[in-house]
Structure formats: C-alpha cells, structure tokens
C-alpha cells in the first residue's frame, strides 16, 4: 500500500521526522525539478546505448495518467475486478447496492499477492490454474458514496459498511483457464473460494494454546476468525498457498499505553487505529480483548486444492508485518521460507523446517511448518552476513527478558530480534530466492526516516526515499546455511537527480524505478520488479525487468505502467513465460480522490462506477515469450 496509511509506519523506535528534515526534503525537491531537464537529455543518449540487456521489448515511457500502458506489441485483459461474483449466487457488481452478504460471494478489494497452482495438480500446465489472490485492505473512500476522502473515511463507516469491508479483505481462490488467447475465470468451479476477516482458522505451532493467544471467545488460544492485511505470500513445495498478514495493527481500536503489555503493544504499532471495526465488534477493541491482536500478523497456510481443509496460522514463522514468504529447499531437503517485516527499521527473517519435506506423500507435509527454527539476519561490513536463531533459552531469549517459552519468542519476534541485534532494514518487502542462480533478492522499498547516523552497510542511504535491492548468496550455495554474503544489486531513484542511485550505467531515461516491492523471476532467472509509491518521483508505479548476470546486470527497463494511484503487485509468469499476471491495487488512491470524483475510473471508465482493483493478464500479441 502507499499513500494513506499502513506500510509507511514504524514501530521500531527511531524518532520522528524533524522540522529540519521536512525543510531539507522540500529543498531537495526543488533540486529535483532543476535536475530533470538535464536528465531527459542524458537519458536520450543512454537509451541508444541500452544494448547490453537481453530483453528486447520496447520500453514504456514514465507517465502518470488514468490508464495502464504496455509496449505496442502486447495486450492487456482484465481477468477479474473487485465485486465480480466468485461463488455461486454471487451478484454482479453494483456499487450502489453493496451489502456484506453480497461482498462475501464476490471478489474482494485491493488484490495483492498472486499465486498460480497448476491444474491438474502436479502438471506442467500453462493454460489452467488455480489462481490464489490476497485482498490486502480497503480504500473505503473509493468504495462507498458520500464517505469523503482520505484515511478518515474509514473511521466514518456504519455497521453494514464495516461488515462489507471485513468481507472485502482476506483472499480468493479462482479456477482460471486460457481458451485461445483469452483467459477467463471458470464459472462454478468446485475450487472457488473466498476467505475473509471472519473465516474460521486454526492456530498451529509454538503459539497455539499460549496464554497470550486466549480470548473470551476462544479459551483454547488455538482457533481464530479470519485474516486481514494480507499483502504478499508464497507457496510451499507441496502446493499450498502461504498468505501473509502485514499491517494488522490498524484494525484494532484503543490505546497501546493502556494495554496489559504496553511495551509489546507499542512494538507492534497498536494504538494507530485506521478502521472503525472496533466500534462494531468487541474483539477489535483492545480494552475488551487485549490478546486478539496477538492472533494476527502471521503467515497463513491454505490448501487451494482442498476447500474443506481449514486454513492454519503457522506461528513458528514469527509474528510481524509479514510481506511474503518465498521458499527454497536446503541441500538436506528442509524447507526454507524467506520473509520480510515491512516497516521502517525492521528485519529480514528466514524459517527452516526441522524435517525435510516429503515429495512422495503430500499428507506428510501437512504440519511441517509447525516445527523449525526462525532466524533473523545481520548484515555485516565486507559483504558478510549471518542468520541468527530465535530460539527460547538461547542467548538473551530467556525468562529474565520476558521470554518464558518459544510461544513468547514468536509472538514477540520483533523484540527477540532486537535483543539479538539484527540489522534494521529499509522496509523489507519480497525476499525471494532465484531458482536459476541460487541467490536471494531482498526488495527494500524505502525508508524516509533513516537518519545519517543510522545508516549501516546494507542500508547505506540516509532518508532512503527510493529503496534498493540486496542480493544474498547463501553460504556453500545452501539455503540451510546460517552464513552468506551480500551485495547491493541496485539503488533506486532517478540517476543524476536523487543521491546515491546505482544501476547499470547503460540505464535509459525510462529504466529507473522507485520503491521496489514485489519481485519475480522468469524461467531464465531474470528479475522482474513491481513498484509501490512511484508518486515520490512524480510517476505512476510500474513493472521493470533486468538481467542479473552478464553485461545487462542491473539494467532495469520499464515494461508496464499502472494507472494513477495504483501499485503493481503479484507479478507472476506461467512456466512458459508467455502469460504474465499482475494485481493492480488501489487505482485512484491519493489525495483529493473520492468515490464521487476519483482520479481514475479504471478499468471500467463508466460514469458512476469507482475505480476497481483488478487482476490483469498480459500477453504478447503473437503469443511469444514476455519480454523476450
Ligand atoms: Fe503491503 Fe509491504 O506492502
Ligand atoms: Ca508496499
Ligand atoms: Ca507489498
Ligand atoms: Ca514475488
């Protein structure tokens, strides 16, 4: 998410923005305007030299208008939009007749993570999948008429509108298929599913049944209703979906200082209420149910192939503002999940299962993620790094510091990582292993509040408004290793305008990016980067591609531009690289935009219809490989 709340919060105490910083920022913007004219000329020269890239698509220019843009020889199909029916009996989208019962059967709001699971299961299909989708949050001001603009709109909703919001969060499972060049959602699929803020789930792992997980509705501490704030995710080797709860603190009402555990509450950002849910449901009221927030901020495992299997919160993977959870397999067969805590100054984690996964017996992997070791990263000088285990009883993680058991460690994973002196990062988003080159890529989206005295080797820019991407090489080429080396692949921003940018010198005027968020790789192992917050550089968000090896390394090129206000999420390619799925989140978000007068009505462009977050499909008109 971008403009009006959420990721851009920090709970790792690092001080507030000072007046002086605000003045400096304003001055540097003026410098930006002066620099842009010169850059346009330099860029023209650079474009002619963009030869080293292995990508052959024609770059799309930076812009910021009501619609999306792709190269001329590509086409865009809208696969599904907020409010389209998903389940039997689902009503067609009608923004003037919304209800919670209708929304529960329809596609949710703000699609983020996308994952594709082949049909039939285990096949190498390129044209039939289960598509899993996260619905991260709601832009209430763009959903409902007469609610006004901005984040305050969320606090004005009535009971039914709050219930609609709850039903618009969570996730969806869709069966999708290609017929000729046309992709569509298969109607009446037995796999079709909506998961929302009230779906029944179980709690697995070391926090299951813990005293801090018990509420008046759930004295077992092992059952919970729903998930929300689900940003990115991943999948397991056995084909389940991992969906990650990120900015969950905004859904709870009340004061952190009055919480029975005020230090823990503050460390997890409670008290910055952005939704009205606590007015209508006691479980979101901190004064009434202080343990309810401990039951959110987890990685949730869902089996898209089995609608009857109850989703499980995998607490062994720790509690924080989870971006995603992408896996690799260690040399000994254990599964390694890489994860980022997306807030300013938070950490990069990985979880390693205790046991290897079983490729021949899917059921044997059912609760594999409940046992293992959570680690947090420390990035050192000289390109070295270590993964430090967060294990109760080891080092400072003892009762004397408030950790009576492993449940305490995972519930307060941020505090445990603080004590181990993990490296504070510039908002870790996707942390994703590359199956082709064996390295791991960490998208650090930005950190406008890092002060000069707070820089560290892996986060070297003070006031990092544009982010950077780290590249980790696991020790011995083994994802199970607790050592590794690291390098900075690129430092984002406008070359020649923003301080400290770093790309391949052949970058064109259209190739620079800002605020990397979700990443993916094509079958050749080349990197695709989706961005979130282009407006900090006066442009719309986009999708960029670059080589990771050879003369085109870090030579990013712009492939797609989103409509105004939208973030690009969930980039996913089919195994043959001929179909690209993107989640276009929060089109029309931003100051001055409302239901009545949105900055765009993408993708319908129909009077009276607000913008609709949608999943799109991009193909080449000749059916060729995307990006080539
Ligand atoms: Fe929801 Fe970290 O972006
Ligand atoms: Ca983001
Ligand atoms: Ca994200
Ligand atoms: Ca990704």
Image (cartoon, rainbow, N blue to C red):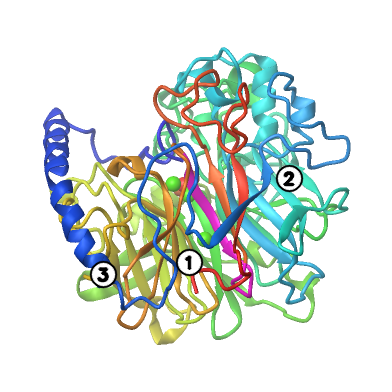
Is residue 200 toward the left or the right of residue 39 in the image? right
**Residue drawn at point x = 59 percent, y = 71 percent:** 353
Q: Is mark 2 within 8 Å of ligand 1?
A: no
Q: Residues within 10 Å of mark 3 (few under 14, many from 20)?
A: few
Residue range highlighted in magenta: 566-578
The vertical placement of 216 against 391, above or below, is: above
Residue corresponding to mark 1: 432
Q: Does residue 171 appear anywhere in the picture?
A: yes
Contact (CB < 8 A) between labels 1 and 2? Answer: no
Q: Viewer-nearest of labels 1 and 3? A: 3
Residue corresponding to mark 3: 48
Q: Quadrant of residue 265?
A: top left
**For marks 1 and 3 on the same chain, the one whose residue lies earlier in the sequence:** 3
Of 577 and 401, the residue lying toward us: 577
Q: Quadrant of residue 171?
A: top right
Residue corresponding to mark 2: 201
């Amino acid at each position: 998410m971008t403009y009006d709340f959420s990721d851009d919060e920090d709970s790792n105490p690092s001080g507030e923005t000072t007046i002086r910083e605000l003045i400096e920022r304003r001055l540097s913007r003026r410098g930006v305007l002066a620099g842009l004219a010169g850059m346009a000329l330099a860029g023209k020269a650079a474009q002619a030299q963009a030869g080293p890239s292995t990508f052959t698509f024609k770059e799309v220019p930076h812009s910021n208008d009501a619609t999306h843009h792709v190269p001329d020889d590509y086409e865009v199909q809208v696969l599904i939009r907020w409010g389209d029916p998903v389940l039997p009996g689902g009503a067609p989208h009608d923004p003037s007749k919304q209800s919670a019962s209708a929304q529960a059967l329809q596609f949710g709001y703000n699609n983020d993570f996308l994952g594709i699971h082949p049909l039939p299961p285990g096949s190498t299909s390129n044209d039939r999948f289960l598509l899993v989708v996260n619905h991260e949050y709601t832009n209430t001001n763009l959903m409902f008429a007469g609610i006004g603009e901005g984040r305050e709109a969320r606090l004005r909703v009535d009971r039914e509108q709050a219930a609609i919001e709850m039903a618009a969060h969570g996730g969806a499972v869709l069966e999708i298929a290609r017929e000729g060049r046309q992709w569509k959602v298969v109607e009446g699929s037995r796999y079709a599913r909506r998961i929302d803020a009230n779906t029944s789930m179980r709690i697995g792992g070391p926090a299951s049944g813990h005293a801090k997980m018990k509420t008046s509705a759930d004295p077992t501490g092992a059952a919970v209703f729903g998930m929300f704030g689900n940003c990115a995710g991943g999948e397991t080797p056995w084909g389940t979906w991992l969906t990650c709860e990120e900015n969950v603190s905004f859904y709870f009402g009340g004061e952190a200082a009055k919480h029975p555990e005020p230090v823990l509450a503050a460390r997890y950002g409670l008290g910055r209420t952005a939704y009205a849910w606590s007015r209508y449901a006691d479980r979101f009221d901190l004064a009434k149910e202080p343990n309810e927030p401990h039951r959110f901020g987890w990685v949730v495992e869902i089996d898209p192939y089995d609608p009857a299997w109850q989703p499980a919160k995998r607490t062994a993977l720790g509690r924080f503002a989870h971006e995603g959870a992408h896996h690799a397999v260690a040399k000994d067969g254990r599964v390694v999940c890489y994860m980022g805590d997306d807030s300013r100054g938070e950490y990069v984690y990985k979880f390693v299962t205790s046991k290897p996964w079983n490729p021949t017996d899917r059921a044997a992997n059912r609760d594999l993620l409940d046992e293992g070791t959570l680690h947090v990263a420390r990035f050192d000088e000289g390109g070295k790094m270590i993964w430090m285990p967060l294990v109760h009883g080891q080092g400072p993680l003892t009762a004397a510091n408030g950790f009576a058991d492993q449940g305490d460690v995972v519930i307060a994973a941020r505090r445990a990582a603080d004590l181990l002196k993990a490296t504070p990062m510039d908002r870790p988003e996707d942390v994703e292993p590359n199956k082709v080159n064996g390295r791991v890529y960490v998208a650090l989206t930005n950190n406008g509040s890092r002060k000069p005295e707070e820089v560290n080797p892996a986060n070297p820019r003070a006031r990092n408004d544009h982010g950077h991407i780290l590249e980790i090489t696991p020790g011995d080429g083994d994802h199970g290793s607790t050592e590794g080396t690291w390098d900075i692949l690129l430092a984002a921003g406008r070359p020649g305008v923003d301080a400290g940018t770093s790309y391949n010198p052949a970058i064109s005027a259209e190739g620079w990016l800002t605020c990397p968020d979700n990443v993916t790789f094509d079958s050749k192992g080349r990197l695709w980067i989706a961005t979130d917050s282009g407006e900090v550089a006066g442009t719309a968000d986009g999708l960029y591609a670059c080589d990771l090896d050879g003369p085109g390394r870090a030579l990013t090129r712009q492939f797609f531009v989103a409509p105004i206000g939208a973030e690009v999420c969930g980039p996913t390619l089919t195994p043959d690289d001929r179909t690209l799925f993107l989640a276009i989140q929060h089109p029309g978000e931003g100051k001055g935009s409302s239901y009545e007068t949105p900055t765009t009505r993408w993708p319908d462009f129909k009077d009276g219809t607000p913008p609709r977050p949608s999943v799109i499909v991009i193909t080449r008109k000749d059916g060729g490989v995307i990006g080539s």
